[in-house]
Every structure is written in structure tokens, then in C-alpha cells.
Image (spheres, helix red, strand yellow):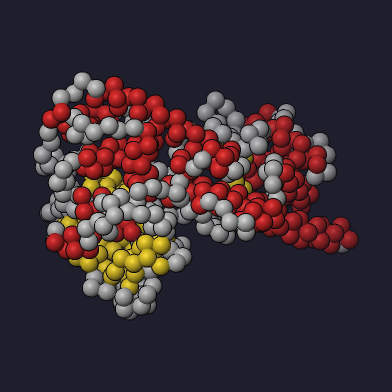
Amino acid sequence: MSNLMSSTTSKIMLMAKRDYCLTINSTTTRVLTFHRRLTCSAAATPRLVPNPPDLVKWVRREGGFVHPSVRIAESDPYGLGLVASEEIPKGSELIALPEHIPLRFPLLESDNADESYSNLVNLARHVPEELWAMRLGLKLLQERAKAGSFWWPYISNLPQTFTIPIFFPGDDIKNLQYAPLLYQVNKRCRFLLDFEKEVRREVEDVKLEAHPFGGKDVDASSLGWAMSAVSSRAFCLRFQNGNHGDVRMMLPLIDMCNHSFNPNAEIVQEQRSKDPKMLVKVVAGMNIKEHDHLTLNYGCLSNDLLLLDYGFVVQSNPYDCIELKYDGGLFDAASMAAGVSNPSFSSPAPWQRHILSKLNLEGEQALLKVTLGGPEVVEGRLLAALRALLASDAETVQKCDLDTLKSLDVEAPLGLATEIAAFRTLVALCVIALNHFPTKIMEDESLLKQGVSTSTELALQFRIQKKSVIIDVMRDLTKRVKLLSSNESIVSQS
């Protein structure tokens, strides 16, 4: 599969970005409403300590607000999460956290910092930007090791383990059967092993009072735990005053909301124009019924990202897709398998190369990863390339703007014959991709029924969904080919 799927992703996608939209509620208050990636508390794993402090009471004691009808509860199929004990009207404030409750790193200028913190900052400089979760994870480990930490009631409620692939047994990592995800998992595992050595070197001669982790040993496993806790729970919030910009932080209790693409709650950040302090709130986006779990939209994420950072897979995920590497030889083979004569993917004409360059599919800085599935069905760059390279009339192609060539909603911009050839090539490409999986969906479903470990179950669910994406794309494109062929027949008869 490695010769088909792209394994050269430059960064871990979407780990450092959240989608948000700024709106003005009044002349004095700016409200930042957004969907972000939260942890799903669905995994029924034990907390860090057997009987942790009551998190709701702690938030209230520290000046936060928790709606009287919001409870922490465990219930199938979600596991531990926040549940409404009675009906809650739309617009109700569910949770509000004052500025001192979130856990952040680096600290704001107003916070006190000692020598151990300075050493922690030095460690964080060894972490690449795309693995920002490890930077905040270092602060989390420091607070976990600190006796009497302010955040201990929160930290003690965190899971002992996470059901994400970096903690899978080797066989279950292989069971994912999908090169792009395997690449990301291996990348993170290698980083953790290397960073463990770096941490040991940095702290071996440090005095106890200046030790960032209170003299406690930190290994790859604890680093992985911290990075997983952060990547699955951290928010990126924006300060409207000062020079702080975007600050990533963990929000106690709020991060226990479960996921839904149709959530019943939303996050709001409030900050008054003349006051640097902020409130982070969860507000009911609809009427919430008794016993309903509080849900937030973690983002429009593929199953790759949901499994990599959160440890779960969504069935029939509308944002799931498969990654392919744009390769002329592969696309020539797919075209010929589809019965398309004289494909030119391996040897495009100069005018076609110019279009490929505009699509960033050729050149030194080319991004060769393309996708099938998700809301687009076919990534626009890929569709435009297929249309241009299968067309024989350079003048017609050059008259079309790139947005038209990239749109699946624009029917046959270069003629019916070119459109049918492009879709047939894509269908053949799907067949090739599907055949690179060593097992079939029916075999995977049969294995699920046998009773397997959590990691094996997740690996099986993940690859079933990937194959389902390919099949769905094939069905969609086949319908389009049939419709276009019937139109072509009508045109030829007339």
C-alpha cells in the first residue's frame, strides 16, 4: 500500500488549528464562538487515581459555574461524560470557567515562574511546532508531579490510559492497514523515544529544587500519556488584548463533553474590551432532554485524526476520506484499466504541466497528497488535473478557469467524453486502492464478532470505514458515469 498512499505529510494535520468565528454581542463584550477538538470520554478507562476529588465541586469552589442539572455520569455507549439530570432550555449557560482555572503553557506574564519552570521552558524548545501538544504536556507532567498542585483535582480525574494508536500493540498498529496513519503513528512514537533521551540529558545534573518534575523520572510512556491528554483535550483561545495572541490551554470539566457532528452545546469565550480577563463558557445550543449527554462538535475531522488524537472512529463519517499520492504512472495505469486510450499523466504536454503547476501538483514545492471522499467526493485539484490531462483540446481547457475545472458541481466543463474518461479513471483508481487492503470488509466484520481487544476493535473499525469511503466514492462516480453516458447517447442520436 505504501506505493499508493502518500507517506510524506509535512506536519500533523489540524493539531495546531481550531476553527473559530469572531462575533460582537455588544459594545463591551467580544464573544468568540467556535467548534474545537475535544476529548471523547467514551473510553471506559479508570481515572488517574481510584477516588479523585469531585471535579464539579472544585470548579464551583474556584469561582466557576456549573449548571445544577449537569452531572458527571457513565452511560453506554459514551462512557464517562457530562449528562443532563433534567431538561435544560436552549441558551442556558452550562459551564463557565474564570481565567485562572484553565491549564496553559507558557504562562502569562502575570504568573509567577520559578527556576523549575524556566527549565521546563528549555525542554519545550526541543519540541517541534507540529507537536505542540507535547509542550503543554510538559506543563501537565510538572503539575502532576507537584505536591499540592492547584490543578490536582483536575489532573487526578484524567484517564490512566488513552485508546490512541501510539499505545496500540505492534500487531494492531499494522492492523490499521493504512499507510498515512501508520506514518503519523510511527512518527509520534519515534519522537517520544528520542525526546525521552533529551529530557534525561537536560535534567540529569539539575538540583532537586530546580527539577521541572520534582525529581521524578519521566519516560516515553509518561510523555506519551501527557501528549495524548493534551492533544485530545486542549483548546486554542484568543486573547483580544495584549500580545498573547492564540494560547492553547486545557479546560477542566468542559473537556468531558462527548462528540457529535450535531452537537447540543457550543463553546463561547467572553472577554470585555477593557479587561484582559476572560470567561470560557459552554452554552446549550438547543433544548437538552433529561439523561442526554452534553455534546460538542470536535471539528469536521476525518477518522484518521479522530483515532490519532481521540481514540475513536465515527461510522459513516461525512468528513472521512482516503489519501493518495499523485503519481503519473499510477494514474496512467488506472486510465488504461478503465479503457481510456492514450492517457498522458506520465508525459503531460507543456500546457498541461503549466496547469499542474498551478494546481501545485508539479514543481519543487508540489503537494502531491490528494484525497477521495469527504464532502468534496473528489478533491478539486485532483479532478482538475484529470480533466486537463484527459482533454485533447488545449484551447478549450485554457479557456476554463481553475475553479471551474476543480468543481464537481460543474458538469462536463470540457465535454462529455472527457468527463466520462475522468470519472472512469477515478473508479479504476478506487479499485486499485481497495485491492491494496489485504482483507475485505466482510472478513473484518467477521473478526469483530469474535470478541477482540479494544485496540484490535478500533483498528478493525478504522479500516472498515476506510474501505467504505472508497466504495461510496465508487458508487457515486459510477452513477455519474451512467448518467453522462445516457446523455452522450442522446446527443449522438440527435
What is the x, y in percent for residue 20? 35, 54
- Displayed quadrant of residue 178: top right
- Displayed quadrant of residue 387: top right
> So how many labels did they put on this image?
0
Name the foreground residue: 60 vs 260.
Answer: 60
Above or below, comparing residue 275 to residue 383 in the picture: below
Residue drawn at the location 18% of the way across and 59% of the way down? 58
Residue 300 in the figure: left or right of residue 428: left
What is the x, y in percent for residue 248? 28, 45
Residue 231 in the figure: left or right of residue 70: right
- Displayed quadrant of residue 118: top left
Residue 309 in the figure: left or right of residue 88: right
Q: Is any atom of residue 347 visible in this view?
A: yes
Q: Quadrant of the N terminus?
A: top right
Residue 118 in the figure: left or right of residue 199: left
Above or below, comparing residue 166 to residue 71 in the picture: above
Name the foreground residue: 260 vs 345.
Answer: 260
Name the foreground residue: 4 vs 483.
Answer: 4
Q: Quadrant of the C terminus?
A: bottom right
Residue drawn at the location 72% of the way across and 44% of the way down? 435
Residue drawn at the location 74% of the way across and 56% of the way down? 478
What is the x, y in percent for residue 7? 56, 34
Q: Residue furthest right?
A: 493
Residue drawn at the location 45% of the way across and 34% of the way down? 189
Name the foreground residue: 71 vs 365.
Answer: 71
